[in-house]
Image (cartoon, rainbow, N blue to C red):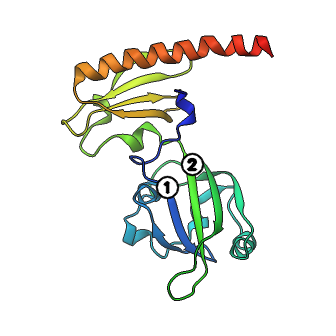
Amino acid sequence: MTLDAQPIDSIADDVWILTDAAGFVQKCSPAAVALVGYSARGARGRELPNMFVGQRPRLSELLSAAQGTTIERDATFRPNDRKALRVHFRVERADPSPDGQILLRWTFTLRWPVGMRIPQGVDRRQLITVWRDDAMRCVFVPGGKDKRRLLVCAPNDDVLHEESAVSVADAFTRATELHKLIGSEEQSVPEKKARV
């Protein structure tokens, strides 16, 4: 299992947004609603390119995408009332709406920061760092039975891996397994380079 091969999204939901050809939001997946920081209703009608603070898609690019050209790149996206995130996005023409309107499908790949992964009602001060090394750390999010999470994070707080935790004891046992797994992957990398 390679941890950074698993982009984190909202509980296995794809992060996608449908816009018209000018970039105005028509519909969002539940994970995309969490990304933009508005309710599904509040996101509808917003100009999605204006939420980018770096590498913003231009109208000419969107019109090209409406003709069948795919746009794909890394960018900086700023959710409503939150810090900007690094994302990888792809824009391509989607199936038209029932009324024949041209739609664009935006898909996002991102690593959710810890702050966006903490369940409602859990205070950030409650987080417990189970282990830490130079490259990452493992954080246990306590809370009610349905709120316990185990997060493996990069130094900048991007979540690389997330699991639900049944109990505190299970979380600490699993954290130890993850640490051993990550350690063995890091040791095997130089061996692969030596063979090349």
* Left or right: 62 as drawn, with respect to 98: right
Badge 2 marks a residue whose secondary structure is: strand
List the single residue furthest toward the left.
144
Residue depicted at 57% across the width and 87% down the height:
100
Instruction: Identify residue for label 1.
Output: 15
Badge 1 marks a residue whose secondary structure is: loop
Residue depicted at 61% across the width and 66% down the height:
49
Q: Amino acid at mark 2?
A: Thr
Residue depicted at 43% across the width and 55% down the height:
31
Q: Position of residue 136 (x, y in %)?
A: 51, 22
Dot 2: within a 10 Å radius of its alpha carbon, few (fewer than 14), some, or many (20 or more) residues? some
Question: Does residue 132 appear anywhere in the picture?
Answer: no
From mark 1 to mark 2, how far is it between C-alphas? 7 Å
* Quarter of the C terminus within the rendering: top right
Q: Position of residue 166 (x, y in %)?
A: 24, 30
* Left or right: 51 as drawn, with respect to 11: right
Question: Is residue 78 depicted above or below 195 in this figure?
Answer: below
Question: Is residue 131 depicted above or below 67 in this figure?
Answer: above
Residue toward you, 150 or 114? 150
Q: How many marks?
A: 2
Q: Are marks 1 and 2 in contact (CB under 8 Å)?
A: yes
Q: Position of residue 144 (x, y in %)?
A: 18, 36
Dot 1: within a 10 Å radius of its alpha carbon, few (fewer than 14), some, or many (20 or more) residues? many
Question: Does residue 56 appear anywhere in the picture?
Answer: yes
Instruction: Identify residue for label 2.
Output: 109
* Left or right: 186 as drawn, with respect to 112: right
Q: Amino acid at mark 1?
A: Val
